[in-house]
Image: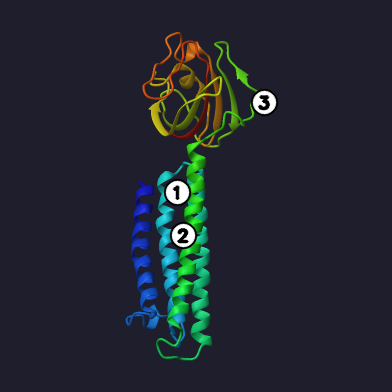
């Protein structure tokens, strides 16, 4: 419940601050109601340049508040997307604070000048550069994180140094040990996974799949192989045919089929564990 409340507060903050900053940038002036306490700690020389920095401070803080909704709603998930979102929030806030401090300094250092004394073309050029830089960094970080999240592991590069065998032939290796809640039978788990045949043929991938562990919703090898994992962990499973699709296999149209008596290689990441 508290995550929803936090997300609502962040949305309200962003929805009010971001449009205000955009308006200030567009008009190159501060609104008339910014007097007294609302104007503090600015000085008296509110040039278009000062207003421009003030506007960017509002836009960046507002955008940071909106981006912060992503990791707040995804808690306790510690995926790359959540970490990238937090990094973007910190970036926005740092640049926003720098812009705000710069506007304060200019409001005391510059002499009072009539509106329009700063070249409009220069202001627009600086604004376009700032927009391109901030949007480029944010989109690049989110795109990289999304690609990373979509592929929790790679069959050709993951290291199987100490596979742990079981009596029924199931083997697993913890590529990354998680630190969150442990997965146990009866718990609702959310995972992302990629499945290959043992010859390297990729069969399936899912970035978000939720089910109750131990209820037979998935193949037995996956049901058993997830037990003991902790949120944030990534595990490599080698599942023998008896714990996968057995002698019947699966004939898929369209898409790759699973031949009879196939051993499966599954790389799975545990995103969350619920009641």
Disc 1 packing (10 Å; few <14; some 14–19; many ≥20): many
- Closest to the observer, 158 or 250: 250
Tell which residue pokes out farthest to the right in this image. Answer: 161
Disc 3 packing (10 Å; few <14; some 14–19; many ≥20): few
- Residue 265 vs 147, above or below: the answer is above
Q: Earlier in the sequence, mark 3 or mark 1?
A: 1
Q: Residue at x 52, y 37 (%)?
A: 232
Between marks 3 and 1, how big is the CA–CA gap?
33 Å
Measured from the top left, where is residue 134 in percent x and y? 49, 62
Q: Which residue is mark 2?
A: 135
Measured from the top left, where is residue 246 in percent x and y? 46, 10
Between marks 3 and 2, how big is the CA–CA gap?
41 Å
Q: Which residue is mark 1?
A: 71
Between marks 2 and 1, how big is the CA–CA gap?
19 Å
Element on which disc 1 rests? helix
Tell which residue pokes out farthest to the front in this image. Answer: 254
- Closest to the observer, 28 or 64: 28
Q: Nearer the viewer, mark 2 or mark 1?
A: 2
Q: Residue at x 47, y 44 (%)?
A: 146
- Quarter of the image containing the C terminus? top left
Quadrant of the rendered structure where residue 156 is?
top right
Q: Earlier in the sequence, mark 3 or mark 2?
A: 2
Q: Which residue is mark 3?
A: 161
Is residue 118 visible in the rendered image? The answer is yes
Residue 112 — which label?
Answer: none
Q: Nearer the viewer, mark 3 or mark 1?
A: 3
């Amino acid at each position: 419940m508290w995550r929803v409340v936090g997300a609502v507060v962040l949305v309200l903050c962003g929805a009010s601050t971001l449009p205000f900053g955009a308006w200030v940038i567009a008009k190159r002036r501060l609104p008339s109601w910014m007097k007294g306490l609302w104007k503090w700690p600015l000085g008296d020389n509110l040039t278009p340049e000062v207003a421009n920095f003030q506007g960017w401070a509002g836009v960046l803080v507002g955008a940071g508040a909106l981006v912060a909704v992503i990791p707040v709603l995804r808690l306790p998930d510690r995926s790359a997307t959540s970490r990238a979102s937090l990094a973007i929030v910190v970036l926005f806030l740092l640049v926003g604070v720098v812009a705000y401090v710069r506007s304060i300094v200019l409001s005391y250092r510059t002499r009072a000048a009539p509106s329009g004394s700063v070249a409009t073309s220069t202001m627009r050029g600086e604004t376009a550069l700032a927009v391109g830089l901030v949007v480029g960094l944010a989109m690049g970080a989110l795109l990289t994180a999304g690609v990373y999240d979509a592929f929790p592991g790679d069959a050709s590069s993951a290291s199987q140094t100490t596979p742990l065998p079981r009596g029924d032939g199931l083997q697993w290796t913890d590529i990354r040990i998680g630190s969150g809640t442990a997965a146990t039978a009866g718990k609702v788990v959310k995972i992302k996974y990629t499945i290959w045949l043992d010859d390297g043929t990729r069969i399936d991938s899912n970035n978000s799949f939720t089910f109750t562990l131990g209820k037979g919703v998935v193949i037995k090898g996956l049901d058993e192989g997830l037990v003991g994992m902790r949120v944030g962990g990534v595990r490599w499973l080698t599942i023998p045919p008896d714990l996968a699709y057995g002698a019947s296999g699966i004939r898929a149209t369209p898409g790759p089929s699973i031949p009879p008596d196939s051993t499966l290689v599954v790389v799975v990441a545990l995103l969350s564990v619920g009641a």
